Amino acid sequence: METSGSIPGTYQSSRSFSAELWEAITPIYTAILDHPFITGLTDGTLPHDAFRHFIEQDSHYLRDYARALALCAAKSPTEDDVRAFAHDAVSAIAAEQEMHAEFMFQLGGSAEEAEKAPVGPTTRAYTSYLLATVYGGSFLDGLAAVLPCYWIYARVGTALLAESSPDALYARWIATYGDQAFQSVVRRVVELADRTGAEATPAQRAAALGHFVTTARYEWMFWEAAWRRESWPV
């Protein structure tokens, strides 16, 4: 609803855009917390083969996610936002090179093996959608598409941090996303979504929300794919 003092064409609401976004994916987030991959992290029952599948696919995913963040940087409205997204893109690549190499070593493999692993169906679908949205859409569309990876991992990390895990490998993964430095980064991106959403029209917000819900679903599917050790059917 627009108010008499609003900028013509922009959306004015008593609720923040981020509140609207999170409400739309609450059932998806609940399903993620209940997923056996996630519960298996905290109770230590997740098979290492499933976690290795996740790390291999995440290595592929993060390379394209870094490209998506670099595109968000190029389309960002302010110089501060350009620098922040550029830094996040570099950090995504660093995570792939450092943390994943460490995990693969502990799982009896190597970063080179992760790189050579086939890109799975869900990974290919997720990154293709992500890059198409960021390339072809508005800045708000791209921001909404990359946001679930930030926000859901932060929420999952916080939820799991209190329980940690009897498996040292899984406890390390949980600590990474429950870390306050990562939480601070996510708060910055959520605040940017609020700021950008406040300047958008209702139609623009609705389109962005659709992208946000879609990539949130892909987050659930990514863990499901690892749980099933997904491969191409033919």
Image (cartoon, helix red, strand yellow):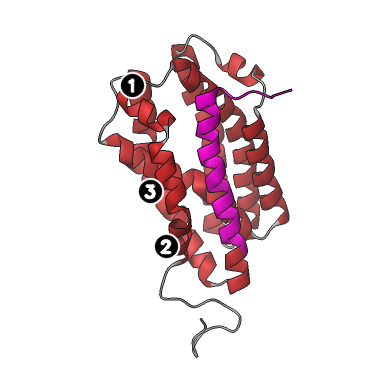
Q: Is residue 218 magenta?
A: yes
Depicted 159 relative to depicted 79: above or below: above
Residue type highlighted by circle 1: Gly
The residue pinned by badge 2 equals 19
Name the foreground residue: 207 vs 79.
207
Report x, y in % for residue 108. 48, 9
Front tag of 2 and 3? 2
Magenta-drawn segment:
207-234
- Please give left or right for residue 181 compared with residue 107 in the image: left
How many labels, in total?
3
The residue pinned by badge 3 equals 184
Residue 44's label in the rendered image is 1
Residue beneath the point at 60% across and 39% down: 66
- Contact check, label 1 and label 2, Cβ < 8 Å: no
Report x, y in % for residue 160. 32, 36
- Marks 1 and 3 sit apart, C-alpha to C-alpha, by 28 Å
Q: Is residue 64 magenta?
A: no
Q: Secondary structure at mark 2?
A: helix
Q: Quadrant of residue 140?
A: bottom right
